[in-house]
Amino acid sequence: MAFPTSPTNGQTAVVNGISYTYNSTTNSWGRVAQSVRITYTSGPTPPTNPLQGDQWYNNTTDVLYEYTNDTVSSYWLDIQTPAFVGSNATTVTGVSTGKSLAMSIIFGAQ
């Protein structure tokens, strides 16, 4: 679908599933802000029917994941564990307690 050829100020058009509003002062279409819904879940198994951006804290493994899509497939991505290249890994002690405490505060776990 294309934008209307003779729009009026404040007119809304939906193009490729995205809403735009026409501004006659600037003679341009602006994208309409949409609310973002992100769900945060805590538990031993991932939630069903996640949407891109949802986050899941696996309280069994103490790892935080985000549901993502790389244009090929959708999957849960570990967004907490550092990724190291080559021999740049460093041992960090005392992190587990801090993560658990932070996640308890965020998710209300005991």
Image (cartoon, helix red, strand yellow):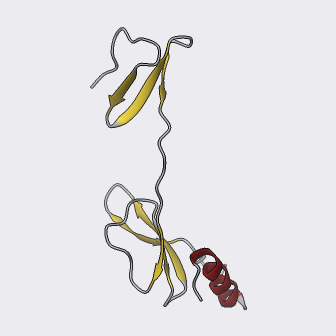
Q: Position of residue 89 (x, y in %)?
A: 65, 82
Q: Name the residue nearer the viewer: 13 or 66.
A: 13
Is residue 90 depicted above or below 77 in this figure? below
Tell me how many marks there are.
0
Q: Residue at x 34, y 20 (%)?
A: 3
| Residue 7 rendering spot, x and y as whole percentages | 39, 12
Q: Is residue 88 above or below residue 61?
A: above
Question: For the point 36% across and 8% down, which residue is it?
Answer: 6
- The residue furthest top is 6
Question: Is residue 72 or residue 79 the one in the foreground?
Answer: 79
Q: Foreground: 107 or 81?
A: 107
Where residue 61 appears, as percent x and y from the top left, is 50, 89
Q: On the image, which quarter does residue 87 sit in? A: bottom right
Q: Is residue 57 visible?
A: yes
State the image coordinates of residue 70 (x, y, percent, origin top left). 39, 58
Left or right: residue 11 compared with residue 57? left
In percent of the image, x 47 and y 31: which residue is there? 31
**Could you tell whether 84 is left or right of 53 in the image?**
right
Q: Quadrant of the N terminus?
A: top left
Q: Quadrant of residue 72?
A: bottom left
Q: Quadrant of the C terminus?
A: bottom right
Q: Is residue 87 visible?
A: no
Residue at image position (31%, 62%) is 73
